[in-house]
Structures are given as structure tokens and as C-alpha cells.
Image (tube, rainbow, N blue to C red):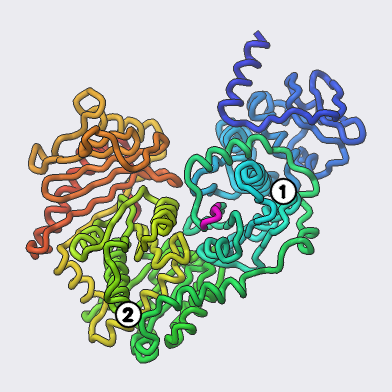
Amino acid sequence: METSVLLVVSLMLVQSQCFIVPAKPGVQKKNVKGIKRMEDKQNLGPLSDLIPFQSSDIKIPSESNALFHLVFERFPGHVWTQLFKSWGLGVTSAFFNFMYWNKNEDVVREMMKKDDAFFKNKEAMSDLFLKRLKFGTAGIRGPMGVGFSQMNDVVIIQTGQGILSCAEKHIPNFKESGIIVGYDGRHNSKRFAELTASVFLNGGVKRVFLVSRVCPTPIIAYSIRALNLALGIMITASHNPKEDNGYKLYDSKGCQIISPIDKQIQEEIMRNLEIEDHIWNIDRIRDQIQPCPLDSVLEKYGQSVLDGAYDLGLNEKSQVVITYSAMHGVGYPYVNQLFKLFKFKPLVLVDAQCSPDPEFPTVRFPNPEEPSSLDLAVKTADQHGSTVILANDPDADRLAVAEKAKDGQWKIFTGNELGALFGWWALHRLKSKQPNAPLQDYYFLASTVSSKILHTIAQAEGLKYDETLTGFKWMGTKTYDLEQEGKHVLLAFEEAIGFMDGTHVLDKDGVTAAVRMAELVAYLDSQGKDLHQLLADVYDKYGHHLTHNSYYICRNQVTIENIFHRLRHFNNEPDSYPPSLLNGKYSVTRVRDLTTGYDSGTADHKATLPTSKSSEMITFTFDNGLVATLRTSGTEPKIKYYTELVASPDLKDKNELNHTLNEMVEAIVSEFLQPEENGLTPRPI
């Protein structure tokens, strides 16, 4: 019976990607009460007596490892034995592995502060130690804390070791080409960056750059091509809550990685879990890393952005006062440098938000998409007679924009509205600077859940348009591919206030976006207009594109699966989807399912965009021009919906169009998502 139980547990550990690593060859093993342990110098004493299992996979260090033994001061020995019994072999083994590898005393002391209920909660302990943050195309991101499922030194080092091993196998001359590591202003970001640099230096990489100060994510993406490097890593959790941190990986093109590279890295992480002691010595890396390249890189970056400038004279003359917030992040020095280069008047600063602060003390969420995050910026702008607000998120790869209307009310533009403004401005600049440019060689790009306004403009003006899956990893890669064909991308955008204006950075860039938007404001000021009026002109010419995007919170994966299974088997058969809304009032004309690969609008009913079974995403197109996409979030427990009513230019009654949009959105939510039946929580207001 005992053998069968152990076999079941072993299978469970493999499936959960637990980190049970056998002792290294050549290390002497000694059997103490059935426990084979790793021995440093001498007998371990009573610690092995606490473990109620027979296993060769539990790592127990010598008594000289004071940090490891520190955690066991939390309870008397017999209490630990009872805890191990309740946890089971899998959790106990993973717990010992983590504590064995960890050399950060703060992590241990933080764990010792936990109450008794924390240690007695087997499910919570299993989540922390048996599960692992899985490396995906967006890297890793999650709460900071103890265990393999959270962000900490052990996970950071093991992730770096996996990337190093993968790069050695798949990138020719990787160790000669090198890598750059950057970090934002969050708790532990600098330390995570230093440990990452240590991994690569100790792995024999000859060119390892580590920035000497906090910097925006797009600067790291730009640096890769500027310095001719193989990879770039940015330690950031972007706009996530203060408890989180993250890790983004860029390839030699300066693009975020795409599949199957993420899967290859995950496999290499699992093959390279052992951590050598010298990796932890970050003091010794300071003499080995390359000099910080930021100053020279920023000079090149500034010139790249300046090459696309419209009219510096208009910038100098503009009387519009612009207020800026860095959202407690890293953007201000970099945005300020560009504004000086572009000859703008000094920005009005939201002083409390323009220096990095990992506590984000003045906002509920450090996300400029959330309207409340701009409250202090609005107050500051009103105090200084400012009519435009620009706000980056904490790692400055996104941009929010607000403008004070003639009636004194502030409007925060949606990401889709900003996409329309940026698209118009990019095309206007091209036509002004290169009136004979072959427009058929120029592209607009957008993610599939973003507004179709760029598609409409492209059709009307003779440009090309393409859309990708959600995420700039796809748009950056698509841009690179088009460049190789001799084509040009004017603008790429996604509705989550991410914009790529130009191709000097193949990722969303809130620093460049800030100065481009300021240029547009200066141009409109010279024409006696503002952003409100331009947006109205765009929609008047090309047709209203009305959007309504939101989400529901759902923490039950089974519920999420059931919701999407019902939509795919509406008539109790595969690929049978809801045919209409409101008893046939609005008919579905096309369904594209990028989870299963089904597309009713293609000849073979196969989707042309990449598909992924690991995430849910279905798009419905209706007979009146409404497009609705339902998808799950890759980083948050959310079911998101994106809707847009694309109207022809002759339909001018915006109120009537909004009525139709709202009616259809309410029906999509009630008939497709069924929030009451499924216990979904609406988006907080």
C-alpha cells in the first residue's frame, strides 16, 4: 500500500512541475531514518528526525546552513512533523527544496511572521510550493513572496538559468552577442535585475549590460538593436498592483518573444533548477558587467524620435499647457528629455507622482486606464490652467491622455479613440513630409480586439491594414517581417492604451507616444482646434466607431470553461454558436474562435490568425456592423468583452447608435456570459 501511495504522489509531482531534484552525482548520501540527505560537512542533527516520510528527494542541509534552519524556529519540532504529515510528501519536498535553494534572509523572516493558519492551510501551501509561475510569451508576472508560484530570488535565478540554457542551444554566438537587463522602480526590481545579470555573467556571457538606474521598458527594447545584442530582459510588473513584479524577455529584434520560444524556455527552466552559491554574490558582478549604456542609448533614441518630428517651430509657439504624470513610475526623466529636445515649454508636473515610488501611494491602481488614477492629475491641471494631461503607466510603455473641453469638463480618451487620433496624425505627417509616398507600401496595425478605425481609414486612403492577436509581441514581430519586405508601418496600437508610432522601438512605447501626442496638440493649437474637435472630424469623415469594453471577474476556472463550452455547443453540437441576439433582432453573420481555430467566414472554416487552446477567445460579427469579442485575460481572473459598432459615414445620429450599442452589449452580457447564473463579479466602478 505504501508503495502505491508514493507512486501516486510522484505522478502528481511531475504533473504539477514540482521541483524535486535528485542529489548531484558524486555527493555522498547517508541514510538517516529512511531519509537520504545532502551532506555538507557533518551530521545534520535532529532536523531529519522531523520528517515523517521515506524519500531520497528531500534536500536537508548541514547544521552550518543557519538560514535554512532559521525557519524551523517558527514551531517546536513535533509541530513541524504534524505539518509535514498534513502537507504530504509532495508539498514537504517542494518546501525543503525552496528553503534549501533560498539565500535571502528577508524571505525567511517574512515567512516566519505568517500566522499559524498560513502553515496549516495545505491548499495554500500546495499552491505556493507545488505550482510554478509558468514562463509565457509575456514572461512571468505575479505577487512577490515565498514559493515557486510567486516572484522571489529563487524563481528569478531559475528563470534566468533556463533562458541562458535555451539561448546557448538556439542562438548562435549568444555568449559573444550578449544581453541587457533593465528594471523599474518596484520593490525588489533592482535586486532581481542584479541576480539576473549574475546568472548570465557566471554562465560565461561576455557582454552583460545592467542599467545603473531605473528606466522605461521601451528603452530596453530599443537598446537591443542599438547595442547589437541577442536578448533583453526588463524587470517590471508594468501597471499591476504594488504587490507584484514581473520579467519581460525581448529577442534580438527588440520584440517580445512568441511561441514556441516560451515553451522551450519553460523546459530549460525545469532542467536547470540547481542554484550554485556564487550566483548569489551580486557584489562581485559590478567589476564584470559592461559600463551602463543608458546615456549613449538615450542619445540615439532621442535622435530616432526626433527624425520623425513634424514642426519644432509649432512646438515652441504652442500656448497649450500640458500636465504630466509618471504614475509613481520611471517615465518622467525620459519624457522630460524628449520634451526639451522637441522645444516644448516645461511640463506641469504632478509632483507626488513623478518620482518612482513602489507603494503607489496616491492611486488605488497604478493603471492610467482606470479613471480614478488621473484624479490628482486633473486637480493639478486645474490649478495651473492646463488643458491637456499626459500620463504614463509605471514602466512608461503606455500612455493615457485627457483634455479639458470648452465646457470645463475633462474627457479621458479611450485607447480606441487615441488610436484614431494617433492614426490620423501619423498619416498627416507622412503626407506632409512625403507627399509622393506610395501609400500602398504603408501599414496600420492593430490587435484584433481593438477598434477597426485604422482599417476604415486605410481603406479610404489607400493604405494597407493588418491585425494581429492581442499583444505587441505579435505587432512587433509583424512590423519586423513587413520591414524585411520593404514595407513601412506608420502606427500599431491596441485598445489598452499601447501605441507604437514609428519602428525605432518594436513594442509599445509610452515615451515616444507622449511627445507625438504633444506635437499633435501643438499642431491643432496652430489650427485653432483641439483633440475633441479632431476626433469628431475623424468620425464624421470615416464613420462613427463606438466602443464599449469591460470585464467580469471570475476566479473559478471551471465556470470559465463552462461559459465558453456552452457558446461553442449552443445546439449541443461542436461549432454551433448563438445565431442571434434578442430573439433574432440582431443576427450573427460570422464567428471566429481562436481557441478552437474555427472561423465561419473562411472557405475551409479555419481561422487565419494563430490559435491557442490555453486561452479563450471568440469573436462575433453581427449584421448591423457590431463586432464583439469575448476573451479571458492571460494575467488576471477576468472575462473581458470588447464591442464596437462600426457605422457608415452617412449615419450621423450618435445618440441612436449609442442606444443600439448599449442594447446589444446588455444582451451579449446577459445571453452569452449569464453573470447571475455563473456568479460573475462586475468590474469595480
Screen quadrant of the N terminus? top right
Q: Is residue 528 left or right of residue 657?
A: right
Alpha-carbon neighbours of circle 1 within 10 Å: few (<14), some, or many (≥20)? some
Q: Which residue is mark 1?
A: 109
Res 633 → quadrant: top left
> Circle 1 sits in a helix, a strand or a loop, which is it?
helix
- Residue 608 percent location from the top left of the image: 31, 41
Residue 251 on the magenta span: yes
- Residue 542 percent location from the top left of the image: 16, 65
- Note whether 124 is above or below 108 in the view shown: above
Span of residues in magenta = 249-253
Q: Is residue 108 left or right of residue 32?
A: left
- Residue 536 percent location from the top left of the image: 19, 71
Q: Residue at x 26, y 62 (%)?
A: 463
Q: Which residue is mark 2?
A: 521
Screen quadrant of the C terminus? bottom left
Q: Count the marks: how many?
A: 2
> Circle 2 sits in a helix, a strand or a loop, which is it?
helix
